Amino acid sequence: IELKHFPYVMCAKILGYKIIFDKVENYKYFKDKKSISNWINIKFGLFLDKWLNFFADGLLVISSKLNELYYKNNLPIVLMPNSIPIDKITYSSKQQYSKPIKIL
C-alpha cells in the first residue's frame, strides 16, 4: 500500500471492512530510491510491516519467502504464486491444455 491510499484503508477499517494486504515485495531489501516519493513509500512500507497486526486482517503473498517472513504475525495468509513450476507439470496435463486460444 502506498501512503496516498492509507486514508482510504483506515476509513474502511473504521467502517468495519476487512483489510487484506497483498505483499509482493520485501521493503527491507528495496534499493530503488530514485525520488523522494519513492523513498517515502519505502519508509511507509517498513512502518506498516511493524504494525501489520493492527492494520491488516489478512495477507496475500506471492512467494514462499514472503510467506515465511510474515508467518510470525499470526495473520491469515494466502499464498498465491505468480509463476508455475514447469517441472511439476506432467505430460498429460500439458497435453490437456494444448488447444489454441480462441479470440472472440
Image (tube, rainbow, N blue to C red):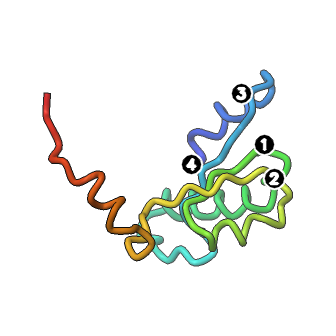
**Which residue is more in the foreground, 4 or 69?**
69
**Residue 90 appears at what percent x and percent y?**
39, 68
Q: Quadrant of residue 70?
A: bottom right
Q: CA distance from mark 3 to mark 4?
A: 15 Å
Q: Residue at x 58, y 78 (%)?
A: 29
Label annotation for residue 12? 3
Label annotation for residue 2? 4
Q: Residues within 10 Å of mark 3 (few under 14, many from 20)?
A: few
**Residue 47 appears at what percent x and percent y?**
73, 60
Q: Residue at x 78, y 42 (%)?
A: 57
Secondary element at tag 1 = loop
The answer to the question of whether label 1 and label 2 lie on touching residues, with beta carbons closer than 8 A, is yes
- Which comes before the other along the chain, label 3 or label 2? 3
Q: Tell which residue pokes out farthest to the top in this image.
A: 15
Secondary element at tag 4 = loop
Q: Residue at x 60, y 47 (%)?
A: 3
Q: Residues within 10 Å of mark 4 (few under 14, many from 20)?
A: few
Tag 2 residue? 75
